[in-house]
Image (spheres, rainbow, N blue to C red):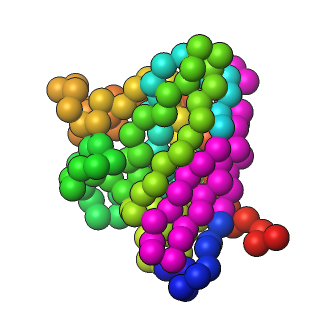
Amino acid sequence: MASKGTTVKAIALITGDNNVRGSLQFLQKHNGVTHVKGKITGLSPGLHAFHIHALGDTTNGCNSTGPHFNPLKKNHGAPTDQERHAGDLGNIFADSNGIAEVSIMDLQIPLSGQHSILGRAVVVHADRDDLGRGGHELSKTTGNAGARIGCGIIGLQSAV
């Protein structure tokens, strides 16, 4: 965890299918909360699942980022659920121009320590996340979120 009064910063540059592009900044405050903020463009209007995946490997595009980041081996759920993957960040909303303004605060995605998300990937999916409540066979593992249409590796950002 960041020491008192300091902030750990990271960045992910999102690239993907059909001109999906974006930049996300991750700021971990001394209280352990990580704020994810930024903008993603080129999306279809509506809700899109938004997750941290286990691997920072994009050798096969977003498909090589592995499963959701899940160090505590839980079922998929909503960001507000007790039973959820650490990487389950719910949905982001793209407006009629395909632009999603992202601002998410979460305690389970630290930038330091045993369960750090540094070096892992953030992934945007084609469909909405059913938050583990959809009744589909994939609901409890992926939220039945569909294809991976954009992703980026989370890396340390300069303090300057």
Q: Residue 49, percent across and down?
A: 44, 33
Q: Is residue 69 visible?
A: no
Q: Is residue 2 above or below residue 107?
A: below
Tell which residue pokes out farthest to the left in this image: 135
Q: Kindly identify the residue that appears in the image at 50 percent across and 62 percent down.
A: 34
Horizontal side of 119 relative to 80 (left or right) equals: right
Q: Kindly identify the residue that appears in the image at 40 percent across and 63 percent down.
A: 107
Query: Which of the two residues, 149 or 12, is positioned nearer the viewer here?
Result: 12
Q: Residue 101, percent across and down?
A: 60, 35
Query: Which of the two residues, 107 or 72, is positioned nearer the viewer here?
Result: 107
- Magenta segment includes 15: yes
Horizontal side of 10 relative to 158 (left or right) equals: left
Q: Is residue 142 above or below residue 80?
A: above
- In the rendered image, which quarter contains the C terminus? bottom right
- Magenta segment includes 34: yes
Specify the quadrant of the image occupied by residue 97.
top right
Q: Kindly identify the residue that appears in the image at 53 percent across and 71 percent down.
A: 29
Q: Is residue 155 visible?
A: yes
Q: Residue 103, percent across and down?
A: 53, 45
Tell which residue pokes out farthest to the right in this image: 160
Q: Kindly identify the residue that appears in the image at 27 percent across and 59 percent down.
A: 73
Q: Residue 59, percent across and down?
A: 67, 45
Query: Which of the two residues, 154 or 58, is positioned nearer the viewer here?
Result: 154
For the stretch drawn in magenta, what is the main secondary structure? Answer: strand
Tell which residue pokes out farthest to the front in this image: 5
Q: Is residue 50 above or below residue 94?
A: below
Specify the quadrant of the image occupied by residue 98.
top right
Residue stretch in magenta: 10-38
Number of marks drawn = 0
